[in-house]
Amino acid sequence: MDEGAILLWLRRDLRLDDHVALSAAAATGRPVVPVFILDPETETLGAAAKWRLGQGVAHFAATLAGIGSGLVLRRGPVEAVLRDLIAETGARAVWWSRSYDPATRPRDVALKAGLRAAGVEARSFPGVLLFEPWDVATQSGGPYRVFTPYWRVVQHRDPGAALPPVTALRAPGVWPDSDRLEDWAMGAAMQRGAAVLARHARVGAQAALDRLDLFLNTQMAGYAAGRDFPAHDHASGLSEPLTYGEISPRRIWQRVQAHAAAGAGGAEAILRQLAWREFAWHLLHHFPQLPQANWRPEWDAFPWAGDSPEVEAWRRGQTGVPFVDAGLREMYVTGRMHNRARMIAASFLTKHLLSDWRLGLAWFADCLTDWDPAANAMGWQWVAGSGPDAAPYFRVFNPETQATKFDPEGTYRRAFIAEGQHTPPATARAFFDAAPRSWNLDPHRPYPRPIVDLAQGRARALAAYAQFREGA
């Protein structure tokens, strides 16, 4: 048993540093066979997220080769793939880092039971989150539903010491066959947009650690005051590597705390954002319908509008409202969108257009390289007013006043809107390189007129809310 190989099934944990399952496997001294499976659940990822995952897998395969190991790639249902690999390698164990999303959690539970019944050691490990969702509970033993009390509980909780990076893995005597990553064509749905996204991607664990160093040394002190200004580089830039497990939340948490202990300012604001991410996963674990159903059931009666030409104009960054369009175009060019712009874009869709938040959720899932199923669902419901810890349901962000406050010189808007500029910057021009040709967009055309009058849209939303609450 001690000499039996361990199949290490990798998913969103593409790093050597602070990797609980990988460190435990290395410590056994047994042969370790890392494997990544393109399973049916992963096949359904949005275009940008699937492309970015492929980039991460390729990078981590090279990282593993650098320590004398490798990465076996297989495609198909997880249980069938793992059973084939067990037969091919004689492996006696399958280990993995836990997943908490509703699409994979029941499958993983059944997989563990099935492997154990067949005499195979099956173990799952923490590592994607700071705290397991079931380990943070109210005094009555239930899940938290509001962020502030959740934050009070976790802000002083020790997530444990981050583990050092694994530097060597014992290889099997014979490696099983592997698929070729390029045959999977994980970026096919991106079409010509992939080349544009590639200019902005920072792939791999070392890039994530470098980004963390830069943030801690030059940006953390100004984070709380500057994080809402999209033209300023005060964001951590760590949402994307967190999504693919290229950096652990525990490593960030402990590095931030260490800088705070040395006298650096701004720590609490960034720790709250990590806790907000944890809270989203806490909710998704306990309420798995969060991405599909209104958190507050009374909102099932709200007359959300369905898809429409106005929603399509929103998707294409053609609303005629510059702050909204700049955010949507930034997402199409970089795969990310500044958090303030996300709130403005989401509010415009759900309030000024009174359109179903699930339409926006689906578009973000298709276009974001830092797409996170928990944060995406909670964020959309928060803005729409139907969700947990939501902004007041009647709050309607005014894109013009928000732009005046958070982009006073128009720097962010000019960075992504080419129309009307004699020499638009590369980021603004890149949107037209990435957009599908079927959209028939041209940067030399006049900027579109607003698809809705902001004052009228706000009044319509408030009237709909008043009628809704009256009926409720």
Image (cartoon, rainbow, N blue to C red):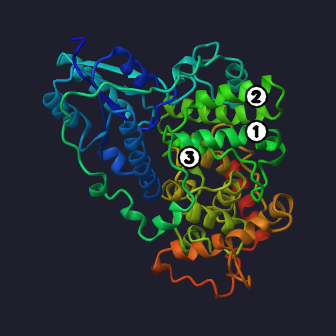
Front residue of 458/173: it is 173
Residue 254 placed where, x, y %? Answer: 66, 25
Q: Which sits earlier in the primary sequence, circle 1 or circle 3? A: 1
Label 2 is placed on what type of residue? His
Label ID, residue 217: 1
Out of 284 and 183, give the one closest to the viewer. 183
Q: Tag on residue 259? A: 2
Please tell me whether mark 3 sits on a helix, a strand or a loop.
Answer: helix
Q: Earlier in the sequence, mark 3 or mark 2?
A: 3
Q: Secondary structure at mark 2?
A: helix
Along the line of sight, the residue nearer the viewer: 264 or 357 = 264
- Tell me how far mark 1 sits from mark 3, CA to CA: 20 Å
Q: Position of residue 71 (x, y in %)?
A: 31, 39
How many marks the image carries: the answer is 3
Give the labeled residue for mark 3. 240
Question: Would you place residue 172 above or below residue 467 in this image?
Answer: above
Residue shown at the point (51%, 71%) measured from the top left: 434
The answer to whether residue 276 is left or right of residue 193 is right
Label 1 and label 2: CA atoms lie apart by: 9 Å
Query: Which image quadrant is residue 216 in?
Result: top right
